[in-house]
Image: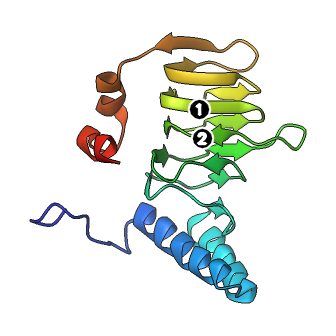
Amino acid sequence: MSDDGRVALRAAHIGHSVLFIYELSRLAYAAKDHYLADRLFFLNNAINGVNILPSIDLPLRSFCDHPNGAIIGRANFNSCRSFSFSNQCTIGNSNNVYPTISGDLVMLPGCVLLGDTVIEGYVIMSNGCKIRNAGRLKNCIVYGEYPNNVIREISSEKFYEVASFKQELNERA
């Protein structure tokens, strides 16, 4: 972090590299240069082992830490919220239905989020958590594997102890 509080791009940091190449692919996709968008997507996959399609619109406050093996599928994200993921995380479909992430989400290593699930408020997926067609999840931490997930309510303060973002940044959004 710089003296003025902004995060500087560090291309040697895999998380920065993943999100930087993803943003370049998004720009190419938005400009309808699908040839370049595809090449940047494959570059991110080849260099970093991460699959984030350029058609996906991640929130501005996205963070990844050691994201090798992550696959972020066609979920609907709220651009004003935050999203953090780690290695071996997957977001995908169940019967061609993708999750809606309209809240703040932290996916710890090895998490899987599939299908008809709506994330609202603050949600943490614990290590190795697997969620499928869970309906609405809000202000909670989720443990275990579908269909036997354990869901515990959490406060925003507890969420920000784990999240990669400062609470005051989200409250201003």
In this view, the residue in front, 21 or 116, is: 116
Residue drawn at (71%, 52%) of the image: 73
| Mark nearer the N terminus (1 vs 2) | 2
Residue drawn at (73%, 20%) of the image: 146
Is 117 placed left or right of 85 in the picture?
right
**119 above or below 86?**
above
For the rendered model, the colour scheme is rainbow
- Residue situated furthest front in the rendering: 172
Mark 2 residue type: Ile
Q: Secondary structure at mark 2?
A: strand
Disc 2: CA contacts within 10 A as few (<14), some (14-19) or many (>=20): many
Counting from the top left corner in percent of width and height, residue 72 is at 65, 52
Q: Give the Cα separation between the discs numbered 1 and 2.
A: 5 Å
Mark 1 residue type: Ile
Counting from the top left corner in percent of width and height, residue 38 is at 72, 79
Residue drawn at (60%, 61%) of the image: 57
Q: Which mark is residue 101?
A: 2
Contact between marks 1 and 2 (CB within 8 A): the answer is: yes
